[in-house]
């Protein structure tokens, strides 16, 4: 499994490198620092959500509500700030509220027995409705946010955007923990064979519950960072984000059947999608065809995942 993940990651790195070289010849703007910086910023915050989704896919779940939860964290942070609360406390409350959404989804899955897909689909609609209800469908302007808070979304450290540093730190810690921490290995055992994991003494329901909470909490973190970056909270923000996040995780090697995947692979999958999007924009490809191309990339990734799982099951 480790060798397969390593091969997948190496393959993605080679594809990204080849695309970058090709685009360097095709467009004089692609390899400029401004474009590279824009690329990194475009997927850094979304990458925080990818981390949570990857761990959830490994355990055998899926969360369609992450885009709505990101928006919910932005709206809650903005609402509380406009009501007089300091933005740091407002952000923490927003992350806690996001984690609560994950707990409700996890409860529906582990206590009631609902499928992750169905439970998260329901909460995707519910949470989006809450965002619209709390704002009356009107974007919240938050330009009065203090500079110290805006720094996490707009500031730089030694020339490197703080957003990218936060993203790298979360990815590094998560990837190391998944590969090395014995506690998090239970995620793989549960996703690979839940019955066997249960018989071996692993409390699989607890593992699935807390991984679901983690996924929503990280979406909340991303929402707070987005708030600091844009200085606004729009109730329609994040629509379709869940598809991009799931696509990135699957392209990076996370199986829709659970039991396999790495954070690094998922991040590389997201990087590939960002490079493809940037390339298509610079090549002046119609936005409609961009979605077609990204959909085809996802189809190829899912097909590869299916073939690998079929071959594994045949052994």
Image (tube, grey):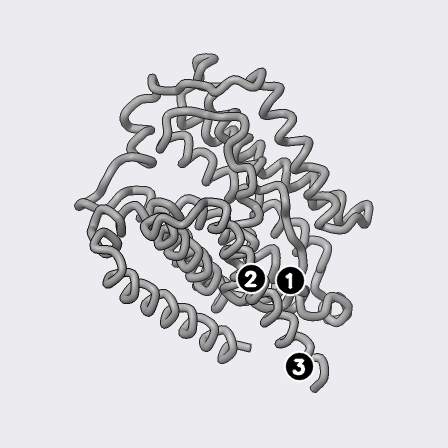
The picture places residue 34, in percent across and down from the top left corner, at: 22, 46
Q: How far, Cα to Cα, is label 3 from label 2?
A: 17 Å
Residue 163 vertical placement versus 184 (above, below): above
Circle 2 Cα neighbour tier, 10 Å, few/some/many (<14 / 14–19 / ≥20): many
Which sits earlier in the primary sequence, circle 1 or circle 2?
2
Q: Which of the 4 image quarters holds residue 59?
A: bottom right
Q: Nearer the viewer, residue 311 or 275?
A: 275
Tell whether 55 sits left or right of 30. right
Residue at numbered disc 1? 256
Which sits earlier in the primary sequence, circle 3 or circle 2?
2
Q: Which quadrant: the N terminus?
A: bottom right
Residue at numbered disc 2? 250
Which sits earlier in the primary sequence, circle 3 or circle 1?
1
The residue lying furthest to the right in this view is 112
Q: Which of the 4 image quarters holds residue 295?
A: bottom right
The picture places residue 102, in percent across and down from the top left corner, at: 63, 41
The residue lying furthest to the top in this view is 83
Mark 1 near mark 2, Cβ–Cβ under 8 Å?
A: yes
Residue at numbered disc 3? 311
């Amino acid at each position: 499994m480790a060798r397969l993940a390593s091969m997948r990651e190496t393959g993605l790195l080679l594809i990204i490198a080849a695309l970058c070289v090709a685009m360097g010849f095709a467009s004089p703007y692609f390899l400029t620092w401004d474009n590279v910086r824009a690329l990194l910023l475009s997927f850094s915050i979304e990458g925080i959500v990818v981390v949570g989704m990857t761990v959830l896919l490994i355990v055998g779940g899926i969360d369609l509500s992450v885009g709505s939860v990101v928006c919910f964290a932005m709206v809650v942070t903005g609402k509380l700030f406009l009501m007089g609360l300091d933005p740091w406390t407002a952000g923490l409350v927003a992350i806690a509220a996001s984690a609560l959404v994950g707990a409700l989804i996890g409860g529906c899955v582990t206590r009631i027995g609902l499928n992750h897909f169905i439970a998260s689909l329901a909460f995707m609609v519910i949470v989006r409705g809450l965002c619209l209800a709390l704002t009356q469908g009107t974007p919240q302007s938050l330009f009065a946010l203090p500079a110290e808070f805006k720094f996490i979304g707009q500031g730089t450290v030694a020339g490197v955007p703080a957003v990218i540093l936060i993203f790298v730190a979360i990815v590094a810690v998560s990837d190391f923990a998944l590969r090395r921490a014995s506690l998090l290995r239970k995620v793989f055992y549960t996703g690979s064979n839940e019955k066997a994991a249960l018989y071996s003494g692993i409390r699989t329901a607890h593992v699935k519950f807390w991984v679901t909470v983690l996924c929503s909490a990280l979406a909340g973190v991303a929402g707070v960072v987005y708030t600091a970056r844009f200085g606004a909270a729009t109730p329609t923000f994040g629509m379709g984000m869940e598809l991009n996040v799931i696509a990135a995780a699957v392209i990076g090697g996370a199986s829709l059947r659970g039991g396999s995947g790495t954070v690094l692979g998922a991040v590389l999958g997201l990087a590939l999608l960002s490079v493809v999007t940037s390339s298509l924009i610079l090549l002046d490809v119609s936005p409609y065809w961009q979605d077609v191309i990204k959909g085809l990339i996802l189809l190829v990734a899912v097909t590869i995942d299916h073939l690998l799982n079929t071959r594994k099951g045949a052994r």
